[in-house]
Image (tube, rainbow, N blue to C red):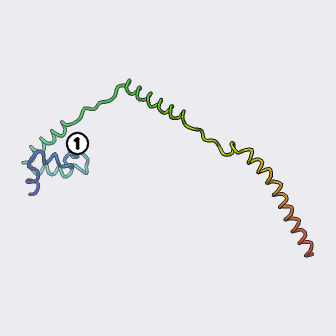
Amino acid sequence: MLHKNKFSTIQSFLEKESFQQWVLFPEKKTTGFWDKFYQKHHDKRQLMDQARELLLSLRFKEQHPDKETIEKSLESALLKIQASSDTTVPVKNLFTRKAPVLWWAAAALIPILFLAWYAFEYAHKKNRLKKI
């Protein structure tokens, strides 16, 4: 009987994480072993009950901030966000900053492409006429 020697004090139950889960957050996965243990070991029930009561009494008092504190905190956060967004540097678009240069390049490219196409067609036409 390993369990009789292992769980001989309240502390031995409290140190076991699965026992804490069984007491504080009972779920089907975690309750099976400890429910059986409780039913099988009548001599350990008093220790288990005491350990259980001690664990349940350790609940901490929950403190929630009042409405005024929440509003002050929110206002402070919003001011910080606004201050950081005011100091950001706007990103300039490449096309607006270099638009005149791009327009001139495109305008110069159109006649060059037209002349290249015309030269290609003229050369092809000449070759076709020679073959006939």
Which residue is at 70% across, 45% downward? Answer: 98
Amino acid type at image mark 1: Leu
The N terminus, quarter of image:
bottom left
Tag 1 residue: 24
| Residue nearest the viewer, comparing 61 with 34 | 61
Q: Quadrant of residue 64?
A: top left
Q: Quadrant of residue 120?
A: bottom right
Judged from this view, the residue extending furthest toward the bottom is 131
Residue 74, x across and y down, in percent: 43, 29
Which residue is at 25% across, 49% downward? Answer: 28
The answer to whether residue 36 is left or right of residue 75 is left
| Residue nearest the viewer, comparing 120 with 55 | 120
The C terminus, quarter of image:
bottom right
| Residue nearest the viewer, comparing 6 with 111 | 111
- Indicate the secondary structure of the residue bearing disc 1: helix
The crowding category of the residue bearing disc 1, from other C-alpha atoms within 10 Å (few below 14, some 14 to 19, many at least 20), is few
Residue 11, x across and y down, in percent: 12, 45
The answer to whether residue 30 is left or right of residue 53 is right
Residue 96, x across and y down, in percent: 69, 42
Which residue is at 6% across, 48% downward? Answer: 43
| Residue nearest the viewer, comparing 128 with 1 | 128
* Image vertical order of residue 51 relative to residue 69, above or below: below
Residue 2, x across and y down, in percent: 10, 57
The answer to whether residue 95 is left or right of residue 43 is right
Q: Quadrant of residue 112?
A: bottom right
Which residue is at 76% across, 51% downward? Answer: 105
Judged from this view, the residue extending furthest toward the left is 43
